[in-house]
Amino acid sequence: MTELRQVDAGDLNVGYTDSGPADGPVALLLHGWPYDLHSFDAVVPLLVDAGFRVVVPSLRGYGTTTFRDPSAPRNAQQAVFALDAVALLDALSIRSAVVGGFDWGARTANILAALWPDRCRAQVTASGYLIGSRAVNAQPLPPAAELAWWYQFYFATERGRLGYDQNRVEFARLIWHTASPGWDFDDDTFARSAESFANPDHVDIVIHNYRWRLGLAEGDPAYDELEDRLAARPPIAVPAITLEGDRNGAAHPPASAYRSAFTGPYEHREVGGGAGHNLPQERPEVFAQAMIDAARMADERDAVAAGEVRHGG
């Protein structure tokens, strides 16, 4: 990737990379927790070689992304990450992008595609459709499923907040191993990402995100209308490709559970060979190809629409 840049965008001063031709189709890549923008290190050159301009930001609470107002609430409800992405596109004068992500980034890509389809030409997400509802999250799951969310309940306690703050690097390494048991990452790879967790807002953002999901922390009332729309499980009509690793150790729904959420051109791809949760870093060729194919699907949709307009005229 190119060197890190900074830009004021909405509530944040965002750290990001911007690679490839300035006039190329834009790919926006969004990471999750506990990962960072380095998850896309091997994806970026593949997309640049395919002619894309590739933008990769650090989410709020990660890397060099900071709040412009030091007194601003460290809000991490799901809607704000999508608003951050829209603000970044605005700051960079980008009208729309093919958006790809995993974990928190997948949820954000889903939200952009569902609520701001004019800003999201197509989307690629690992683990499919992750838009959440606090009412649904309040319902108990079978014990084995609850076990996979152990850290969510840990973070609900002040002991969990303190433990994460004191052990954020060790915590991330544990999650990397459990979420991707077949990924033999080296110390240098982990260390590059671990630097991002030193962000002074990191713990506040992570804790608020998981407590908000369980209804243990409030969000900003200004976003209530957006969250109500998201809780209704809005469909995604833009071209979409979903990916799933065959050894994803993180909690994730089966592909059949979210198929009906995608109402436009759609493909689901299973990724074998021991692929886990962090597909961009574990299988960069697969993720990059999905981005290229999703862009092609969007081009084909646009060509059909243009033909229909000309025919109708």
Image (cartoon, rainbow, N blue to C red):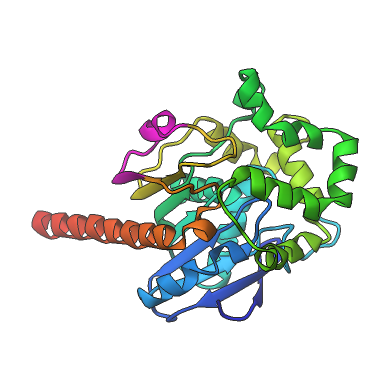
Residue 71: image quadrant is bottom right
Left or right position of 288 against 159 = left
Residue 69: image quadrant is bottom right
Identify the residue shown where x is 61% and y is 25%.
Answer: 145
Q: With respect to residue 32, does 2 lie above or below?
A: below
Identify the residue shown where x is 53% and y is 47%.
Answer: 276
Left or right position of 294 against 19 = left
Q: With respect to residue 228, does 101 lie above or below?
A: below
Position in image of residue 185 (x %, y %):
62, 59
Q: Quadrant of the C terminus?
A: bottom left
Q: With respect to residue 156, does 76 lie above or below?
A: below
Residue 239 visible at all: yes
- Front residue of 187/251: it is 187
Q: Is residue 279 magenta?
A: no
Tell me which segment is drawn in magenta: 254-269
Residue 37: image quadrant is bottom right
Q: Is residue 264 magenta?
A: yes
Position in image of residue 303 (x %, y %):
20, 60
Position in image of residue 275 (x %, y %):
49, 49
Q: With respect to residue 270, does 83 lie above or below?
A: below
Q: In which quarter of the image is the N terminus?
A: bottom right
